[in-house]
Image (cartoon, coloured by chain):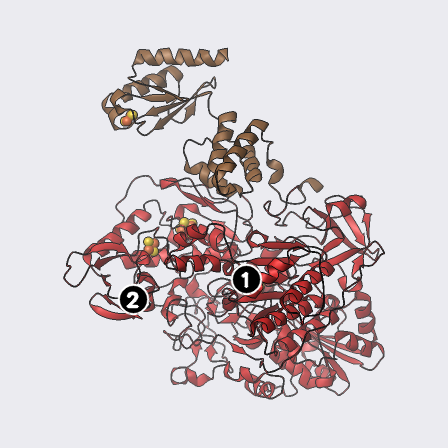
Chain colours: A red, B brown
Amino acid sequence: MAKVVIDGVEYEVNPDNNLLQECLSNGLDLPYFCWHPCMGSVGACRQCAVKQYRDSEDTNGNIVMACMTPAADGAIISINDDQAKDMRERVIESLMISHPHDCPVCEEGGECHLQDMTLMSGHNYRRYDKKKVTHRNQYLGPFINHEMNRCITCYRCVRYYDDYAGGTDLAAQASHHHTYFGRYEEGVLESEFSGNLVEVCPTGVFTDKAFSEHYSRKWDLQTAPSICAGCGTGCNITPGERYGTLRRVVNRYNSEINGYFICDRGRFGFDYVNSPERIRLSPEISDDVEKKLEQFKTDDAIGIGSPRASNESNFALRELVGEDRFFSGLSDSDHEAVQLTLALGQDAAFRSPSVKEIELADAVIIIGEDVTNTSPRVALALRQSVRNYAMDLAKQSQIPAWQDAAVRELAQHDRSPLAILTPYTTRLDDIASEIVLGPPSQLIEVAGAVAKAISENAPTISSGDDRVAQIAKYLAEAKRPLIVSGCSAGRIDFIKVAANLARALSEQRQEVIDLCLTAPEANTLGMSMLTNEENTLGAALDKIRRGEARKVIVLENDLYRRAPHPDVTDALEKADSLLVLDQLPTKTTEKATLLLPATSFSEHEATYVNYEGRAQVSFQVHQNNSGALPSWRWLSKDRKENISSLTERLVKCSCSFEGIKTLRPEIHVAVSGMQIPRQSHRYSGRTAMRANLNVHEPKQPVDEESVLSFSMEGIPPGKDATILGAPWSPSWNSNQSISKFQEEVNGDLKQGNTGQLLLDRDKSDTYLEIKLDVPKADGGLEVALVHQIFGSGELSAKSKALQKRMVDPYIGLSKADAESLGLSQGDSVSIDGNGNVAAVVVRTKMKVGTAALYCGENDIDHHALGETVHLQKVASSHHRGLGNLIVSDLYEEGY
Amino acid sequence: MSGNLIASTARKARKLTEEEVHEIEHEMELYPDKKAVGLEALKIVQKHQGWVSDESMQAISKFLEIPVSDLESVATFFNLVYRQPVGENVILFCNSVSCWVMGCESIKSHINEKLGIDFGQTSEDGKFTFLPVPCLGDCDKAPVMMVGDDLHRNLTHDKIDELILTYRKSKQVE
Ligand code: SF4
Ligand code: SF4
Ligand code: FES
Ligand code: FES
């Protein structure tokens, strides 16, 4: 700790940081643009000018940029000095010379950092009356609007998009007064993290296009702290609702997980909630729904859970049918893989790193998991991990880590090692030190051989790949090695070999090793914790087929995504009665004898368990108006059940849920028992919004169970972030106000909750046996499942914005295989002749013998396919085409 | 169908000539990484083609394996990388202070009149493009301008007439 004096007051600061960051950490207001809490400083905007004095004798001082000046012990500065203030006012005036001042029609208005800083800097009169520079805007795809005239040239966008997120198609162009931030030519912004531009740009250049279609000011949105349902990472988000529809999703800071950034699936993949196809409580059944439900509340029903439903709903189903009759809602292979993941999650040799911890790794191996498309936020973290080499170099040269441009300049293209073992090129290849391409069986060999090279005790597996020794060496020598894998490829051996490799490292280094096993859906782990290992979906379907289960309850799950289609149809048709609870129609709901509408993630309060085994609570944002209830409520034996008593039983069910006890805050945390408002104190139109229907203002809906109320009245969070939906602080209307709620910049939120890790690490185990496949001699190609960030998530794929980026099912082939099969780009093929059709994508960087299969929205019944497939050309048919495939020319050539 | 099934910019590239490739490869030996060669490559292509077309941009981007948007950053930062076609002869006319003191404005008007073009324009016959530049570092011989690689000093109306004639002809001869 160091001491600095700011305007005559002494503050304790961290000398490793810069003055701007420390001013903000200490709650002081100092305007800035180009600095970003996790992208450091470049001193580009000159907005954070302060006066610095040599010593206490110095009365003149000189102006410095706070963001470029270390918070060194003994520093004396002034924010309030007249010259510094004047400078800041002039700087913002010049930055805004050509700014259109179109706040009333600008979607940033009301949460604009530029508005906030303009006021804070005291620039309140526009003197420049000449012609402004204007620009042409670009079409940037379905997610982002472009309004270049509003730019103040802070360079944050390109520093985020290119330097931080690894994008290659956005750049600063031209110079001085006509500097332009855009693409080389119009077109979709390719990065899977483009949506963060909306929050990174301090003004309204990049705004949320999906939000534009039903725009509302920040203060008019009803919000609550929520968890993304897009994948198993569990990013924290703030959805906003107005007039009964969900309008947008923005990032919500969680220091352990997503920090300041989420992915585009999370940001743009929510509007299925508003879908006109949402299941409604049909009038015919609403009268005697209770009676119909009762029929299922008997001893002979079985239940099939859901990895996308909450712990509460899965638990309520399990309670209803009994532990033995509660079955996994995952495919059999996923179930096995996730049960293994859970076992490894209790192994004392490993640690499941949080997203923040992933960023600390200085040597990484990814085994068979395409994280960019399955757990996108993890991929963004891995992009930061390879920079640890640069951070080390900087440290050696005594360059502070926040000196962003200097650190990047110093390291140039040198990075920490990252090995990617993958059947097809991935979007992280540009930062990889080794890319091992091959069909899955070969990759397992390579990873096994790396493990063997690290520890003699590992199972004997050899590989001809000459990179094995190199990869083993850097993993063994790194400060913090990390192994990444997951079950998305449908190969449990990827997880087994990842575990063996981590165990080898743990033995050799005698320490706990980071083993990150991603989870595909929001509650994959939570549901699996509640499921007995032998209760597979296959076993459930058998039971139904054998007539041992006449009543079946399917919780928020399309079984056709989980098992071969004929098996599912066969079983479901054998059941006497089938209760399906879901949000949107699926093939499974078509078969229901009783179909009940379930609330979506934003319509109920519930907990979910992410890939680490971290449980988090997601609060209800708004009400459902079409009769949907949380599934747990439909399933409760007692219809008066409330969530607290259900939670109490869940905690006690001996499935390791003790940790969630503390997650849901009790009402008494709020000031004098008053609920915390979901609406801002400026929320407008309450008396007018329904006036077209009835001039009488209806009573505000009452929330009986939550600490939050559907109202603007009550005590707002203030500076306490226990329950913080949309951050706001006086003078700070934009998302930058988050610093007011952090213990320090980039620190935990005050009274914040980063979730609870549920799994105890108290078991020890040994190496897992891996059966290496003998490649079949039938001439088939080995299937490697491909996922697409836009399309593979079941619910998000129903969102309009995401649909504009989706593609047809395809099968990626090597050039040689395509040629020998007489196939070319865009041909349609039938797979194993059983009605599955995919388009051919010839990829130059793919090994012979691989078939990289993307199943679209379950258009291909991949559970019915074996490990190898045969292809026959059929007449071409395309629906979405493949135009949206982002195969950046840098990673793939020859199209 | 298959042609545009997958979004790709690669097929918009032209083929670099052997000479261009040869010269760019030479530059690559002089720099530690390919990205650094971007500007040199732009200059080489401009030397051979007169300007840098979109097709050339894609070709350089492919050749150096750098994103085309990064290359565009460089190309648009420097005013003398031409991203639009220019005339056979580019007149870089100094309008900085010494030349201004020495009456460059009347020279400029004379050129305007003779060629029928103002700054930023190309004459109808495609022979001349007229561009302003800041000080050419030859103030003691002001007013000054450059045509191609040649510097022309102490400009007068007569001298301009003469130069225009020569440049028109010289190119024709070639
Ligand atoms: S577009 Fe936005 S982020 Fe980018 S330089 Fe302009 S103001 Fe800054
Ligand atoms: S990484 Fe997963 S949890 Fe995070 S925003 Fe994206 S889809 Fe949502
Ligand atoms: S924030 Fe310090 S110069 Fe931009
Ligand atoms: S001012 Fe024209 S050459 Fe210097």
Image coordinates of residue A136 in percent, x first then y, are 45, 41
Say which amino acid is labelled 2. Answer: Leu
Q: Is mark 2 within 8 Å of ligand 3?
A: no
Q: Mark 2–mark 1 contact, CB under 8 Å?
A: no
Parent chain of label 1: A
Please identify, in this view, whether the residue under mark 2 or under mark 1 is nearer the observer: 1
User: Quick one: SS at disc 2?
Assistant: loop
How dense is the environment of label 1, judged by Cα within 10 Å: few (below 14), some, or many (20 and up)? many
Query: Height in image: A295 above or below A491?
Result: below
Image coordinates of residue A247 in percent, x first then y, are 52, 62
Q: Earlier in the sequence, mark 2 or mark 1?
A: 2
Image-based side of A182 in relation to A499, left or right: left
Image-based side of A54 in relation to A66, left or right: left
Quadrant hosting ligand 3: bottom left
How dense is the environment of label 2, judged by Cα within 10 Å: few (below 14), some, or many (20 and up)? some
From the image, which quarter does the N terminus of chain A lie in?
Answer: bottom left
On the image, which quarter does residue B95 sit in?
top left
Image coordinates of residue A466 in percent, x first then y, are 66, 55
Residue in front for this viewpoint, A855 or B65: B65
Q: Is residue A493 visible?
A: yes
Residue in front for this viewpoint, A892 or B76: A892
On the image, which quarter does residue A302 sit in?
bottom right
Q: Residue at the location (66% across, 87% down)?
A: A637
Q: Residue at the location (80% across, 73% down)?
A: A572
Say which amino acid is labelled 1. Answer: Ala
Query: Height in image: A654 above or below A685?
Result: below
Residue A310 tag number: none
Q: How many marks?
A: 2
Parent chain of label 2: A
Q: Which residue is mark 2?
A: A28
Q: Which residue is mark 1?
A: A363
Image-based side of A588 in relation to A646, left or right: right
